[in-house]
Image: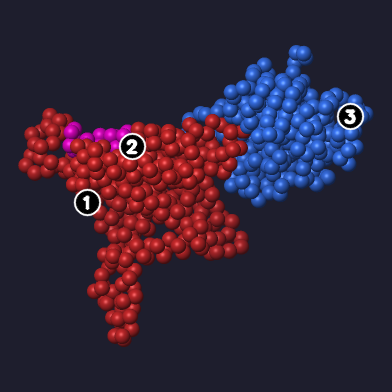
Chain colours: A blue, B red
Amino acid sequence: MVANAVLHVADVHKNFGGLRALSDVDLRVDEGEIHAIIGPNGAGKSTLLNVCVGRIKPDKGHVVFDGEVLDSHTPYEINQLGVSRVFQTPEIFPDLSLLDNVMIPAFASRDGAFRLRPFRKLRLEGDIRAEAEKNLEDVGLAAFKDTEAGSLSRGDKRRLELAMCLIQKPKLLLLDEPTAGMSRHDTNRTVDLLKTIKQRGMTKVIIEHDMHVVFSLADRISVLAQGRIIASGKPEEIKGNPVVQEAYLGGAH
Amino acid sequence: MTKLLDREPVALLVFSAVILLMPLWLTPLGANYPDLLQKFAIYGIFAMGFNILFGLTGYLSFGHAAFLGVGSYAAVWSFKLFTMNVIPAIAFGVLFSGIFAFLIGYVSLRRSGIYFSILTLAFAQMCYNLAYSVLTPITNGETGLQLTLQDPRIIDRMFAPAGAGLPSTNFFGILMSGYSGFYFCAVVLIICFFISRRIFKSPFGLTLLGIKSNQNRMGYTGYNTRPYTQTAFVISGMFAGLAGSLLAVTDPLAGAERMQWTASGEVVLMTILGGVGTLIGPMLGAWLIKYFENIFSAFNEATLEQTFSFLPEPLAHAAVAISGLFVGEGWHLTLGVLFMLIVIFLPGGIMEGWRRLARWIGGGGGGKAKSESAAVAQPAE
């Protein structure tokens, strides 16, 4: 066992009715690495992330994050431990301004899951505001900080969601197809952004269909097919793996 | 000017001036008598508190009248048992409605959306029916809870013997009837405005808006949302209890009909009419409804005939017959039509109408400044 595994998904099983979504999934994500999960549609990739953030409880097996077994943790507790997630369909606050969207997660990281100070003035939270503006700038949305988030394009919503996660400075960032629906230009920018955060040492698990993104970002790749991990290793190993070729790279395309 | 209104002392000063000068500027509208002014202030507080729950968290309670009733009963009991001074009465009203809100909220907030609304409605109707039946020793059933000559009033008795006749409510000697009653309620309303404004402009308020916008995201963002919604529920229940106790202050009796579902529905109407989630909209909605209730219901055929007397007789008859449907007993019809028009054409209520008007008047260059001035009043939008 690797000592510094940040996330360890240990022998996780999950059935939906008769459908076996995950079986015997064992995944180890090391500190600071970008770990890509690829696989055909319906392979169980999103289910795997749902298990990691506490949205779904596994039938068997455990998820261990940073030495803590996440068996009975609620999503908000898991986030407070340091796991943030970008969803496949953007989960933002559509009625609020972009700045508010990014400030809300910042308060959660600073003040914890619940803190009652109803008379504190928002105007005095200059630090958080400045940080939020900085994060919006990083994803290239600074110009729209007072816009209502619901009016953004799908790609921009994703980048906003990324900013909402990054401001929390999570130990582990889970990304479910972060570039889907983005133009080539925005995709490249997002990839660059993720690379710079990599230098800051944030561990990331990324689900992605765009092989260009996967191979330019990932340190390691795991291939999921029919609820099983069929291969795991460095990008060049995966590229040359005949089983993967069969199940995914060659078979599907 | 617009930036100025955003500053707390200025906003408070302007608001206070508008409220305290109500007897003056309501004179042309024929609404400057103390009884109605008191109602304006009291129901303004009720709607403002309701808006902290509905406007910020999006949880639509259909049982807020229960807290109004609890506040009234607690206040009247304070008058009966302890003293005619209004301060303890208000304190008891707020305290008991807060406890009630905590318990009802604890159960109801397990569900959201329509199920939450139904749960609160069920609890309020339960309170209403209990007040009529098993709780008669506390609520005095159908007669309603009133002051009597046999009341102990122990604190008052320590200072003076019981006089002949029923005593009046007072604020350290100042009787709470007529204009002094209104000014007392007005000061409480100003304090409530201050509290509500602070909540709107705090990180706490922003968190509540986040819950309204996407509760699912709040969970994955590390928020435990239940204590937040629970706190908002208790605060708004306490506002309602405060309003209820003020109703008892201005007229020391409490009846179960105050808790009926129609009263809960009324505060929903007030909030939507004025503008959900805006700082002063719900209060304006409350004023509008109370104005209609008191002014339109007072019109009768004679006043209508007088109004239309300039028309030739057959036309005047027709006009009286038609408009007669909308006044007097029929004031609900006017209110219903108005409500439909607002919901259809101005979903943001009076405040949205105000904003559109400001933009329209402001036009091109001045438009931005004007809409900002409107935004001062509704930071939640």
Is residue B111 a member of the stretch shown in magenta?
A: no
Residue B114 percent coordinates (x, y):
48, 46
Question: Quarter of the image holding residue A78?
Answer: top right
Of residues A197 and B314, the one drawn nearer to the viewer in this rendering = B314
Tags 3 and 2 touching, CB below 8 Å: no
x and y percentages locating residue B149 in the rendered image: 10, 40
* Magenta segment boundaries in residue numbering: B77-98
Mark in the foreground, 2 or 1: 2
The residue that disc 1 covers is B178
* Left or right of residue B139, residue B369 in this image: right
Report which residue position mark 3 lands on.
A243
The single residue placed furthest to the front in the displayed view is: A18
Residue B112 can be seen in this image: yes
Q: Is residue A28 above or below residue A19?
A: above
For this view, does A46 lie left or right of residue B107?
right
Question: Residue shown at 61%/60% (left/top)?
Answer: B365
Residue that appears at 54% across and 39% down: B211
Separation of marks 3 and 2 at Cα, in angstroms: 67 Å
Q: CA distance from mark 2 to mark 1?
A: 26 Å
Sort mark 2 into few (<14), some (14-19) or many (20+) by Cα contacts within 10 Å. Answer: many
For this rendering, which residue is in front, B342 or A252?
A: A252
Residue bearing mark 2: B97
**Residue in the picture at 58% in, 64% down:** B363
The spot of residue B66 in percent (x, y) is: 33, 43
